[in-house]
Each structure stands twice: as C-alpha cells, then as structure tokens.
Amino acid sequence: MWSTAAAVAALGDPPGFRHPPGEPGLEDFVEWCAKALRASDPLVLRIAARGMGETAPVLLHGLNAPQTVRSRVEAVRAALGLAVAPDGWADDLAVLLALAPADDAQVRAVAERLAGGLLALLRERAPGVDPQPEIGRYLADGTLERHLGLA
C-alpha cells in the first residue's frame, strides 16, 4: 500500500512494528526439556523439542550482542548464530526446531545435550537470567539438572 509516492504522501511512512524478545523463561525451558526427555511418544518428543528450541535463545539474549531482525527468517538465523552459546548450539538448535533431519534418538540426544549445556552456561555466566523467585537457586544448586535426570 505504501509503495507509491501518492500513498506515502496521503498515509505517511509505513508503520513500524517492533517485537522485542520475550522475557527469559527458564522455568518454561526446563518444562519443555522435561517433556522431551521423558517422552515415550515420538510426536510428544518432537513438539517438546520444538518448545525447547523456541524458548532457549531468549535465555541467551543477555549474553550476546543485541541484534535487530526484520523477519522470522532473520530471527532464526540470528538465533542459530549466537556467539555465546553451548557447544554445538547451531546444529543442536536446528535439530530441535526441525530445520535439520534427525531421527527420534538423535532428537532426544540433542535435547539432553542442549539442556545440560545451556543450564551449565547459564549457571556460570547468567545465574540471574530469570527473575522468578527461587529459580536462580535451583539453577545454582543443580536442582534443575536433577529434575531433568541430567545429574
């Protein structure tokens, strides 16, 4: 609609839509991890893995340089390219988001690796990532890993 000079003159510049990243939700991430790691149904595994993949990048937001993206594609590329992230981040995130082929056993292994790696990184570099009461203590003392069967 704003592609002609007359439209811009009549309507003004196109509206800007900014959608900043959501607040870090460590509890949500751990919940998705638990569902993925305990899934006996492949569909449940894949849905929970995707939930992990969607909630994990926001947890790393404060550890990485801010980026402005203009589309979902750019957002995914930015998430895959985060510099401060657990080892194997880009490949693992691509599997969780179903952007890379993987069988169920591989998805489960990636979910376990990313869950452990992300929790360890957050404990070391961003223990206050989630302002929710008690979640920082659970991160610090290993409760979250024990809950997930990783410790």
Image: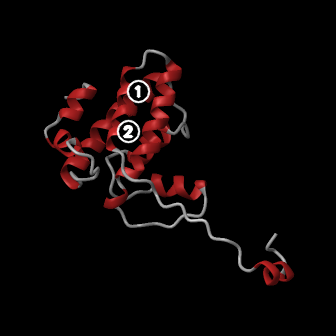
> What's the residue at 50%, 19% (across, down)?
42
Question: Which image quadrant is residue 111 in?
Answer: top left
Closer to the camera in the image, 110 or 30: 30
Residues at badges 2 and 1 in contact (C-beta under 8 Å)? no
Question: Which image quadrant is residue 72 in?
Answer: bottom right
Q: Name the residue that disc number 2 marks.
A: 28
Residue 15, above or below 118: below
List x then y, in percent, for residue 14.
Answer: 71, 73
Where does the N terminus fall, quadrant-wise? bottom right
Element class at badge 1: helix
Instruction: Identify which amino acid the numbered label 2 is placed on.
Output: Asp
List x then y, in percent, for residue 29.
Answer: 37, 39
> What's the residue at 48%, 16% (across, down)?
41
Q: Residues within 10 Å of mark 2 (few under 14, many from 20)?
A: some
List x then y, in percent, for residue 97.
Answer: 51, 39
Closer to the camera in the image, 115 or 88: 115
Question: Which image quadrant is residue 37 in?
Answer: top left
* Residue 36 visible, this orientation: yes
Q: Is residue 151 left or right of residue 55?
A: left
Q: Nearer the viewer, mark 2 or mark 1?
A: 2
Instruction: Identify which amino acid the numbered label 1 is placed on.
Output: Ala
Q: Residues within 10 Å of mark 1 (few under 14, many from 20)?
A: many
Q: Name the residue that disc number 1 marks.
A: 36
> What's the residue at 38%, 38% (across, down)?
28
Q: CA distance from mark 2 to mark 1?
A: 12 Å
Q: Is residue 117 left or right of residue 45?
A: left
Q: Earlier in the sequence, mark 2 or mark 1?
A: 2
